[in-house]
Amino acid sequence: MKTNPPKHEHWSAQLVRIGNQAVREAQTRNRQLGIPNWYSLNGQLLSDAPAATEPTPHTGQQGPKA
């Protein structure tokens, strides 16, 4: 049983925590500004925005819903 992980594992875990915190803060700030956050889940683009803002084909940019 490991009691103390090697230094590189601790350092890597710390970087992941810092990155995750930065992403959560950016997502929160985007929501406050009304900017949708986009995610790819199993190759499908998903957004936390209302359904009226779907990406247009090929560009990935927002466009009106048809």
Image (cartoon, rainbow, N blue to C red):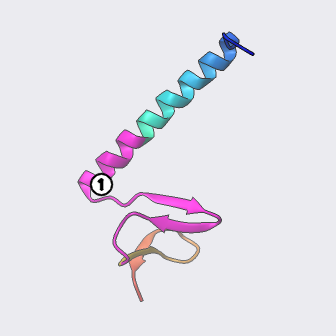
Name the residue located 51 percent from the left edge and 59 percent from the top edge.
39
Residue 62 on image: x %, y %:
42, 71
Locate residue 26 relative to residue 32 in the image: left or right.
Answer: right
- The amino acid sitting under disc 1 is Arg
Extreme-bottom residue of the structure: 66
38 relative to 16, above or below: below
60 relative to 38, above or below: below
Write down the residue under mark 1: 31
28 relative to 21, above or below: below
For the residue labelled by badge 1, is the local secondary structure a helix, a strand or a loop? helix
Q: Quadrant of the C terminus?
A: bottom left
Residue 26 on image: x %, y %:
37, 43
Which stretch appears magenta?
Answer: 24-51
Locate residue 25 relative to residue 42 in the image: left or right.
Answer: left
Residue 34 among those drawn in magenta: yes
Image quadrant where residue 45 sits: bottom right
Name the residue located 68 percent from the left edge and 15 percent from the top edge.
8
Q: Quadrant of the N terminus?
A: top right
Q: How many marks?
A: 1
Residue 29 on image: x %, y %:
30, 46
